[in-house]
Image (cartoon, rainbow, N blue to C red):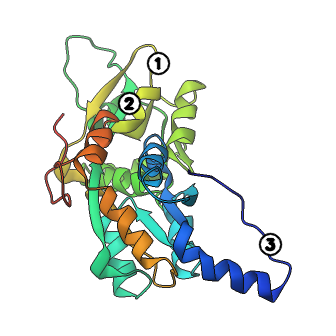
Amino acid sequence: MMTIRLPLICFSLFLAFFAGAVRADNTISITADSSLRPVLPQLVQAWADDQADMKVDLQFTNSELLQKQVVEGKAGDVVIFASANDAREASRRGFIAGDDMKTFARNELVVYGRKGIVKDEELDWYDLLAREWDTFAMGNPSATVSGRAAKSAIEKHDLAARLKSDGLHLAGNETAALNFAKRGEADAVFLYRTDLVKANLQNFVIFAIDAGDYPAIDYTAAPCKNTKAIETGRSFIKSLTTAEAQETLKKAGYGVDGPGPVSSPRLRP
């Protein structure tokens, strides 16, 4: 059975040692990028249901805090990045078990913005960002993978000046970025495709972003180097690539390749 619990404080060295001794058998701690919040609890529950008395500590955070926890050895037993590049860097620096690293799904960046004023004119998102949208919101590039992707796409279209404009709202995650638009404070917002289930604003439409305009958003899981539950971690990571898990991810809007590690192609519009 899956449980989501706050950390417990051990009141003696004996209890701390005992907890560590049994941890590898029936407890696993997972830290994941917050963009997996819509689907990961379901995947964790499905895996835990097949284990004997399994307890799972599951936490979500943004890319910046996740990487900090990995470096400080506080990410638990398994970490799930939203960027394969981040995972490779963590492996290079020896913070995760690179040989057990698996990429199991992907996401896409889109723009959710107000329709163009001139109805007969077909404008791309970058045209509207340059000509009509006075304000826009996105994840903070220093804190989120989506923000780094948005920054890359904006710069690709020679709009870097907009990243320093008064009309830019930076947020700690994609939900917070969308809230700027919901409050009428942003004409457009950069989101993941999987965020669109929460997006139903009047006169807002979805604009696709070319896949070559930003680094791939690939979800990659790996055991942390300091885990005491390496086999349990491997079991959970393997479960993310099963046909059942991949179908669950697909239904939630994530890109998949079917059973096995995800390789390269992006979602289709």
**CB under 8 Å between callouts 2 and 1?**
yes
Give the number of callouts.
3
In primary-sequence order, the first of circles 3 and 2 is 3
- Measure how far apart labels 1 and 3 are at the Cα level: 45 Å
| Residue at image point 35% right, 79% down | 89
Q: Residues within 10 Å of mark 1 (few under 14, many from 20)?
A: few
Q: Amino acid at mark 2?
A: Tyr
Q: Which residue is mark 3?
A: 9
Q: Report the side of 85 relative to 19 (left or right).
A: left
The answer for how far apart the CA atoms under marks 2 and 1 are is: 9 Å
Between 29 and 127, which is closer to the camera in this rendering?
A: 29
Question: In terms of image quadrants, where is residue 53?
Answer: bottom right
Name the residue tied to disc 1.
Answer: 201
Report if the CB atoms under discs 1 and 3 are less than 8 Å apart. no
Q: Is residue 185 left or right of residue 84?
A: right
Q: As shown in the figure, which amino acid type bears the numbered disc 3? A: Ile
* Disc 2 crowd, CA 10 A, few/some/many (<14, 14-19, 20+): many
Q: Which residue is mark 2?
A: 112
Question: Comparing marks 3 and 2, which lies closer to the viewer?
Answer: 3
